[in-house]
């Protein structure tokens, strides 16, 4: 494991960078939620980040998170599923997470809706629709063409709260080259708000290397892993 020497200092540096990007965009830093992407990192690292003030954490796999959760049950954090979710794990995801940020088809949304009805009939599960931008076959997400119909369907689900959109654009060394994808997601959100007849307040976009550009384009949530937790070698 190649760990960050000081998660607390890393969290502070990221928050300072968020504040700087927000100022340059004439926005308030408190408008931007920081999600620590803790996938592949141990429960101890999550606890250290929590003690540094972080409250939102993103995981990629249901099973991995289920293994960590018992060691973190005393924390009052908010747990986000940000990885691709198979429909057959929807019930487990609804139980283990406060938000599923990677919904990309109607059968999955239906299963989450049913699972949430059984878990908390009076509380809605927050969901985001993941949009596939950039044409990369390795990435999941709904296409721009199918997005409006899916949004309308999810907006009608009794036990789901459609809060907005998420994307993972192609990686580029120069963050400004990624910015058009962020602008596209923002414009898609604006069109959907008209279509579904209500606000969709969340734009989850931007990661460790490009969140400054995402904030310039209106990100309300950014997902930061490496800049907080460092890197973790496979197999360790």
Image (cartoon, rainbow, N blue to C red):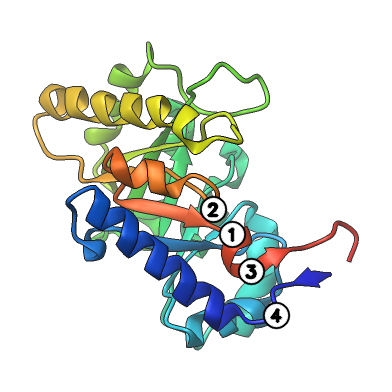
Label 3, label 1: how far apart the Cα atoms are:
6 Å
Against 113, residue 1 (above or below) is below
Label 3, label 2: how far apart the Cα atoms are:
11 Å
Residue 5 is labelled as 4
Of labels 1 and 4, the one closer to you? 4
Against 165, residue 6 (above or below) is below
Look at 48% across and 54% down and name the residue there: 223
Against 86, residue 135 (above or below) is above
Q: Tag 4: Cα neighbours inside 10 Å, few (<14), some, or many (≥20)? A: few
Q: Are marks 3 and 1 in contact (CB under 8 Å)?
A: yes
Say which element carries label 1: loop
The residue carrying mark 3 is 229
Question: What x and y, as percent, mark residue 86?
Answer: 61, 38
Direction from residue 2 to residue 146 in the image, left or right: left
Residue 208 is labelled as 2
Q: Are marks 3 and 4 in contact (CB under 8 Å)?
A: no
Say which element carries label 4: loop
Say which element carries label 3: helix
Of labels 3 and 4, the one closer to you? 4
Label 2, label 1: how far apart the Cα atoms are:
6 Å
Front residue of this view, candidates 199 and 230: 230
Task: Pick the quarter of the image with the N terminus.
Answer: bottom right
């Amino acid at each position: 494991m190649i760990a960050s020497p000081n998660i607390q200092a890393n969290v502070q540096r990221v928050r300072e960078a968020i504040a700087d990007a927000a100022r340059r965009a004439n926005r308030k830093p408190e408008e931007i939620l920081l999600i620590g992407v803790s996938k592949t990192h141990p429960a101890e690292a999550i606890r250290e980040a929590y003690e540094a003030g972080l409250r939102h954490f993103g995981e990629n796999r249901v099973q991995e998170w289920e293994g960590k959760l018992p060691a973190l049950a005393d924390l009052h954090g908010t747990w986000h599923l940000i990885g691709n979710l198979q429909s057959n794990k929807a019930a487990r995801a609804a139980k283990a997470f406060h938000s599923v940020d990677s919904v990309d088809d109607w059968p999955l949304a239906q299963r989450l809706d049913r699972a949430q009805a059984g878990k908390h009939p009076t509380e809605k599960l927050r969901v985001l629709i993941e949009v596939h931008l950039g044409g990369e076959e390795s990435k999941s997400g709904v296409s721009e063409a199918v997005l409006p119909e899916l949004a309308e369907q999810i907006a009608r689900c009794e036990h789901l709260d459609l809060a907005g959109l998420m994307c993972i654009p192609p990686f580029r060394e120069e963050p400004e080259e990624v910015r058009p994808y962020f602008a596209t997601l923002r414009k898609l959100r604006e069109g959907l708000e008209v279509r579904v007849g209500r606000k969709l307040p969340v734009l989850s976009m931007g990661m460790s290397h490009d969140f400054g550009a995402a904030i310039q384009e209106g990100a309300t949530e950014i997902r930061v892993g490496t800049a907080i937790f460092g890197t973790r070698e496979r197999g360790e």
